[in-house]
Image: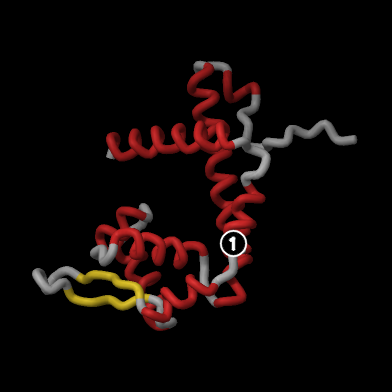
Amino acid sequence: MSTTDPNPLRLRPDQTAELSEHAQLAIEAFRTTLSVAAQLRAAMDKRLREDGLTTQQAALITVVDAAGSPSLSDAAAALACSRQNLKQIASALERKGFLELVPDPDDARTTRIVTTPRSRAYWSTRDTSDADAVTSWFSPLSPADLRTLLDSLNQVLAQLKADD
């Protein structure tokens, strides 16, 4: 039976000598969050692959649906990526018929993103298995644990925005 640490991202003893407990835990939380995010993204990419979509593309569609018709810059900020990267994702989704890039009626220099009827039809007919999969991934956590996780992550997000 292996006694390997289940979290290989944990700091080694030689890395912790001059760090406070808070710093040690913050670094481990950072590393673990990156690992969890990468694994969640890979798992959802696998689910979406058959339909020719990626998690990042689905996230953009979610942002556009939530915001109505965000600008490229606003959507890029929401997804923490560059405007150039966001435009590439949006253009790919436009070619697939899921989004449209349209000039802002009040400012021709601004491009807005809107979902298409095809996108809305696709997501309305997609079965609930995505929700079931996400629920399963988080099944080790109770509703109280999930509330704590969300509160904690939102606090970190707020701090990142304040530091920006």
Q: Residue at x 38, y 79 (%)?
A: 117
Snapshot quadrant of residue 145: top right
Q: Residues within 10 Å of mark 1 (few under 14, many from 20)?
A: few
Residue 92 seen in this snapshot: no
Q: Viewed as shown, does residue 17 lie left or right of 160?
A: right
| Front-most of residues 130 and 89 | 130
| Front-most of residues 23 and 130 | 130
36 lies above or below 99: above
**Residue linked to disc 1:** 130
Q: Residue at x 52, y 31 (%)?
A: 27
Q: Position of residue 81 (x, y in %)?
A: 36, 56
Q: Viewed as shown, does residue 23 lie left or right of 40?
A: left
Q: Residue at x 23, y 70 (%)?
A: 112
Q: Position of residue 33 (x, y in %)?
A: 54, 41
Secondary structure state at the residue bearing disc 1: helix
Furthest residue in direction left, as rendered: 106
Total numbered badges shown on the rendered structure: 1
Q: Amino acid at mark 1?
A: Asp
Q: Position of residue 149 (x, y in %)?
A: 51, 35
- The quadrant of the image that shows the C terminus is top left
- The quadrant of the image that shows the N terminus is top right
Q: Position of residue 24 (x, y in %)?
A: 54, 24
Furthest residue in direction right, as rendered: 1
67 lies above or below 101: above
Q: Residue at x 40, y 82 (%)?
A: 97
Snapshot quadrant of residue 72: bottom left
How did the renderer colour the structure?
Answer: secondary structure
Residue 6 seen in this snapshot: yes
Q: Viewed as shown, does residue 10 lie left or right of 160?
A: right
